[in-house]
């Protein structure tokens, strides 16, 4: 039987440049064959010639028995192609793109099944421009598979993706490999070729410099390393006591070692490889296979498996077992025994302010001490330490949080996943702008640019929402609050709120609204927003309003923690500072300074003002109870960063306050997992323990369905399949 791909003496020149210099190789049926090499090595040129997209200069080749240079029309119906960069119109929908590509072929597979398999079914009506990098690449692979090809070309399918998206695509390629599809894969990731390919050809400057299985190539590299070491030792060491090193030998050593020393010196100076090493290490940790056995499993959506297990592979949940769990050795996994424990999805806090600490520093921070990027990364580490694997930033400075999110997503830093919702949409003189009043005009303008948007018309609001979408935010937040108790704010016009919500929905972004009282809640619902933050601590929200919330599918985030924190500070009570998990993660100096401030004379006026402010925890609890009774979708947000709400163990305390308000533990835990993920539009990735989702998991000792405080008895935290070493989280460099 002829090989699906046969290449003999392939050459390609561009003028005087010879890009491909006589390649010879074959790809066998059912084989994943890799072309590995640096950028510019000639990999993409070779693949495009094989696909019939580019003419060759010389050589002989056949692909599925056809010559791609003269028989491309016969060939195209039988191959699938995922280019290095697939660019579709921003406004084409996922389902439309699949239908369009299906029309190019004489035979196709079921498009709905294909989208489901590639976890794109829920995105079928979404515009291409709204997809993440990983989703766009999955769509590109779907387009390559729509004709059920005999041969699949994947040109650097994971290039430019974040580590988690790379793991997703690699898992998909492994599935295709198990189906015995013939695949030609190009990559410049060595570990990717080793994991996915049956054989590899290493290409450099248009030539194949080595070819074989990944294991064979590793053995060859070992031999080369040994020979180089022997050569250096011969030149460096004297074999007899009286023998001297010849001058020529010294020059040989300088010639051999100087390039390595120069490169090492540059990388040490620039720290270029430090981040790459961290990312690679995190990828390796996430690629492990682990089997959690004999656990009580709270799935997230309300279902409880009294005894079962979860198999984690390549950062994702590979299987969920009810009852009998296989032996770890049978699934080639590391065993994690969880008898007597409860396995939960990683917890989610949908309302935090990373720019604020939750306490009061001992003195104003000078410019050297103030490092918000560093502090935010530490706060995200504190959340992960506590099993809160995802948080949403609600109104932090945009430029900084974008950098922080990139550091977490790349794997360079370890911390909770970060969703961005901000800057806040407010009005001049509205809540959210009062923090900048005392600043000089220039500084005030800079601060407002980072923290708030102040649209004057619906048209301006729509443009600002769209700009934030393209800047990379994950959601939009507006403020409807005129203040109370002597603290009065200008209130955002409701027509502008409607424009904000309309544009956010057009951009596939969830939109939430901060409200101060029941009137604000009603106006926010008229704009058909996705979430209400705070609700009201001033007055009762009627059952009729909650019924409307239920009908519209609007989530309710009561933020009881912030009401408790402000009340405790006003009373001078320090109990919240003494919580065990707070003591473990909050900076010691911050805790001590805050405890001093609680009773200091300097803070007396502030405590008095807070006592008079109309923010009643009991009213908040009663509104939460009515929301639960009305079957509103509840989510957990803490408003962390406000006084005595320290970053880290926020959801644990919020859950305890919910139980105090009469909310069943199962409903509270669902709010902190599945429901919160739904509000973030991320339920297809996080928030549940289901096959195919990210392995963001929390194991606690005991049963939180019987005692909610059990969530603080943390046994294990897992982030995208990585078993988190909690002791190392605050020592990251």
Image (cartoon, rainbow, N blue to C red):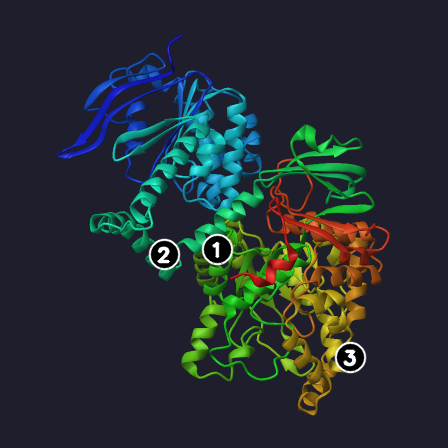
Whether residue 646 is situated above or below residue 631 in the rendered picture: below
Q: Which residue is mark 1?
A: 406
Whether residue 257 is situated above or below residue 464 in the rendered picture: above
Secondary structure under tag 2 reads: helix
How many neighbours does mark 2 have within 10 angstroms: few (below 14), some (14-19), or many (20 or more)? few
**Closer-to-camera residue (198/180):** 198
Residue at the image position 52 percent from the left and 48 percent from the top: 281
Q: Is residue 377 left or right of residue 65?
A: right
In the rendered image, the residue lying farthest to the bottom is 601
Position in image of residue 396 (x %, y %): 53, 66
Given this view, does label 1 or label 2 mark the residue nearer the observer?
Answer: 2
Q: Which residue is mark 3?
A: 573
On the question of residue 679 being in view, the answer is: yes
Q: Is residue 24 left or right of residue 141?
A: left
Secondary structure under tag 1 reads: helix
How many neighbours does mark 1 have within 10 angstroms: few (below 14), some (14-19), or many (20 or more)? some
On the question of residue 633 being in view, the answer is: no
**Closer-to-camera residue (86/24):** 24
């Amino acid at each position: 039987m002829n090989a699906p791909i046969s290449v003999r003496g392939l050459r390609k020149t561009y003028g005087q440049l010879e890009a491909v210099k006589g390649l010879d190789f074959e790809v066998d049926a059912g084989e994943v064959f890799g072309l590995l090499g640096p950028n510019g090595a000639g990999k993409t040129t070779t693949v495009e010639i094989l696909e019939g997209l580019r003419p060759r200069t010389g050589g002989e080749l056949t692909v599925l028995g056809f010559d791609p240079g003269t028989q491309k029309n016969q060939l195209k119906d039988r191959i699938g192609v995922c280019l290095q960069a697939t660019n579709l119109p921003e406004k084409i929908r996922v389902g439309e793109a699949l239908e369009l590509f299906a029309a190019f072929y004489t035979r196709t597979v079921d498009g709905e099944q294909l989208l489901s398999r590639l976890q794109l079914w829920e995105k079928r009506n979404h515009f291409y421009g709204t997809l993440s990098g990983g989703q766009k690449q999955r769509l590109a692979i779907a387009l390559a598979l729509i004709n059920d090809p005999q041969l699949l070309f994947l040109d650097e399918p994971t290039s430019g993706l974040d580590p988690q998206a790379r793991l997703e695509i690699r898992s998909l390629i492994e599935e295709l490999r198990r189906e015995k599809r013939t695949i030609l894969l190009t990559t410049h990731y060595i570990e990717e070729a080793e994991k996915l390919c049956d054989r590899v050809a290493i290409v450099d400057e248009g030539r194949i410099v080595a070819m074989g299985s990944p294991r064979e190539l590793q053995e060859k590299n070992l031999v080369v390393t040994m020979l180089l070491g022997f050569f250096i030792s011969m030149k460096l060491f004297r074999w007899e006591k009286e023998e001297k090193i010849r001058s020529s030998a010294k020059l040989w050593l300088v010639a051999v070692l100087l390039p390595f020393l120069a490169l090492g010196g540059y990388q040490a100076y620039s720290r270029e490889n430090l981040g790459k090493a961290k990312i690679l290490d995190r990828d390796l940790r996430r690629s492990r296979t682990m089997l959690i056995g004999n656990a009580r499993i709270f799935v997230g959506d309300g279902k409880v498996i009294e005894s079962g297990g979860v198999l984690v592979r390549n950062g994702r949940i590979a299987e969920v077992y009810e009852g009998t769990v296989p032996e770890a050795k049978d699934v080639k996994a590391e065993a994690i025994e969880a008898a007597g424990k409860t396995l939960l999805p990683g917890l989610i806090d949908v309302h935090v302010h990373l720019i604020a600490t939750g306490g009061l520093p001992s003195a104003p921070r000078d410019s050297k001490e103030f490092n918000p990027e560093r502090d935010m990364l530490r706060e995200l580490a504190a959340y992960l330490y506590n099993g809160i694997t995802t948080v949403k930033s609600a109104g932090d400075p945009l430029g900084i949080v974008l950098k922080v999110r990139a550091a977490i997503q790349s794997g360079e830093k370890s911390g909770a996943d970060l969703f961005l919702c901000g800057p806040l949409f407010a009005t001049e003189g509205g809540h959210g702008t009062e923090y900048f009043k005392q600043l000089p005009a220039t500084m005030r303008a800079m601060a407002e640019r980072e923290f708030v948007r102040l649209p004057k018309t619906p048209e301006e609001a729509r443009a600002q929402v769209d700009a934030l979408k393209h800047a990379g935010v994950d959601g939009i937040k507006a403020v409807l609050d005129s203040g109370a108790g002597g603290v009065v704010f200008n209130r955002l016009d409701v027509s502008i709120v409607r424009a904000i919500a309309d544009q956010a929905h057009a951009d596939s972004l969830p939109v939430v609204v901060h409200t101060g009282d029941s009137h604000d809640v009603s106006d926010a619902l008229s704009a058909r927003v996705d979430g209400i933050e705070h609700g009201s601590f001033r007055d009762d929200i009627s059952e009729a309003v909650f019924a409307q919330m239920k009908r519209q599918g609007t989530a309710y985030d009561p933020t009881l923690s912030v009401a408790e924190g402000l009340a405790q500070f006003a009373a001078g009570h320090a109990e919240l500072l003494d919580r065990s998990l707070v003591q473990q993660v909050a900076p010691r100096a911050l805790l001590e300074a805050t405890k001093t401030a609680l009773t200091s004379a300097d803070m007396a006026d502030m405590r008095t003002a807070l006592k008079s402010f109309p923010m009643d925890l009991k009213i908040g609890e009663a509104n939460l109870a009515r929301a639960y009774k009305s079957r509103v979708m509840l989510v957990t947000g803490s408003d962390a960063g406000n006084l005595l709400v320290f970053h880290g163990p926020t959801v644990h305390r919020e859950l305890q306050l919910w139980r105090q308000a009469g909310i069943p533990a199962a409903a509270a835990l669902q709010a902190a997992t599945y429901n919160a993920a739904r509000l973030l539009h991320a339920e297809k990735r996080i928030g549940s323990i289901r096959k195919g989702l990210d392995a963001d998991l929390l194991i606690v000792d005991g049963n939180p369905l019987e005692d909610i405080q059990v969530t603080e008895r943390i046994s294990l935290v897992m982030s995208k399949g990585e078993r988190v070493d909690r002791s190392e989280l605050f020592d990251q460099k």
